Image (cartoon, helix red, strand yellow):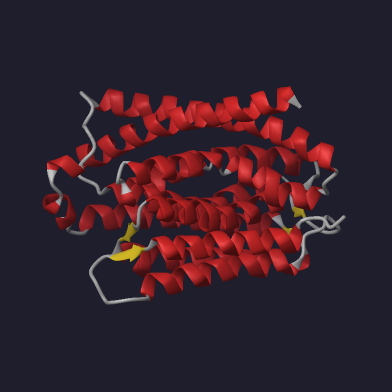
Amino acid sequence: MIHILIFLIGGAALLYGGAELLIRGSSSLALRLGLTPLVIGLTVVAFGTSSPELVVSIKTNLAHQGGIAIGNIIGSNIFNIAIILGLSALIRPLIIKPQLIKFDMPVVFVASSMFCFMFADKTISKGEAGWLLGGIILYTLLSYYKARHSPQPELESVSKEDLPPVTPSLFYDLLYICVGLIILVLGSRIFIHGAVRLAKLLGMSEAIIGLTIVAAGTSLPELATSLVAAFRKQHEIAVGNIIGSNIFNIFCILGIAGLLTPINGANTGLTGIDLAMMMMILVILFSMMFMGKRHAERRLERWEGFVLFLCYCGYLYLRWPKP
């Protein structure tokens, strides 16, 4: 038991350090390229922090553990919004940019709906995986195009005190991002090792392990990055990281894993409750973004973050094995 605690604590420490480096490098890169931190959060940070999900889902699917591969993605997407955004909003109310509501959130709905439709037969074929992978390519190209051809007045209106420090050169930006991602992946692997050993002691099924322990473990880079970003008032990275990660998880990770070998999630314990929860939490978040007065920038308040957190607690109660 002591060894498990060492893995958990050590992994968490590495995750925090990696998140600090990743945020500093990505924020500086955004300013250097004239892009908003939101765009970097939706792409560079989001894709990078989702690398543990990519590794785990490919590895488990190749090992014919489709329940863990699929459960990892479903569980991670639920965890990202309900826990990570929820806790981030509890730390500090998060500013929601109009682009998220008008473009990125609809993309999450499209990606999630496509997945639910394709997974109706409990499998993801190579052809379906190809459509998913095409989705991430199109999304990335559109995000870059919008960033380069849309006015960015928010950068001009932000005071210097609110902006993160810019590193000496582009080399340092990329160095911080790469080293931060390496530390995040290493930290998540160490944490997952301890978490899986703990799960085995508790006697959990393949689906439950994927939906909870593995999903939460692979989402720790997103958790660390968004919480640190919330503390540092980097709202765009805190929110963009989560929305971008959810898009990346479905389009890219399931796309690559499914192209390598078809994903079979039949007879693994996955139920309609899991897919329904993934869609329901999206509807709740979207509703929160439209609530209140019509401002140019909507805030995700602390009480809304608490509601998201309670939703995850209710989900765990429904899915956790009963004695």
Q: Position of residue 228 (x, y in %)?
A: 40, 40
Depth check: 212 or 109 in front? Answer: 212
Query: Which quarter of the rendered picture does the N terminus lie within?
Result: top right
Q: What residue is at 58 percent from the left and 38 percent from the top? A: 52
Query: Is residue 5 shown left or right of residue 43?
Result: right
Q: Would residue 69 be visible to someone looking at this image?
A: no
Depth check: 196 or 103 in front? Answer: 196
Quarter of the image holding residue 300? bottom left
Q: What residue is at 69 percent from the left and 44 percent from the top? A: 213
Q: Position of residue 302 (x, y in %)?
A: 40, 60
Query: How many circles with numbers are drawn on the protein?
Result: 0
Q: Would residue 124 be visible to someone looking at this image?
A: yes
Q: Position of residue 231 (x, y in %)?
A: 35, 43
Q: What residue is at 47 percent from the left and 39 percent from the top? A: 224
Query: Which quarter of the rendered picture does the C terminus lie within?
Result: bottom right
Quarter of the image holding residue 94? bottom left
Q: Where is 275 relative to 290, above or below?
A: above
Q: What residue is at 14 percent from the left and 57 percent from the top? A: 153
Q: Where is 90 relative to 110, above or below?
A: above
Q: Position of residue 206 (x, y in %)?
A: 81, 48
Depth check: 263 or 43 in front? Answer: 43
Query: Is residue 25 shown left or right of residue 277?
Result: left
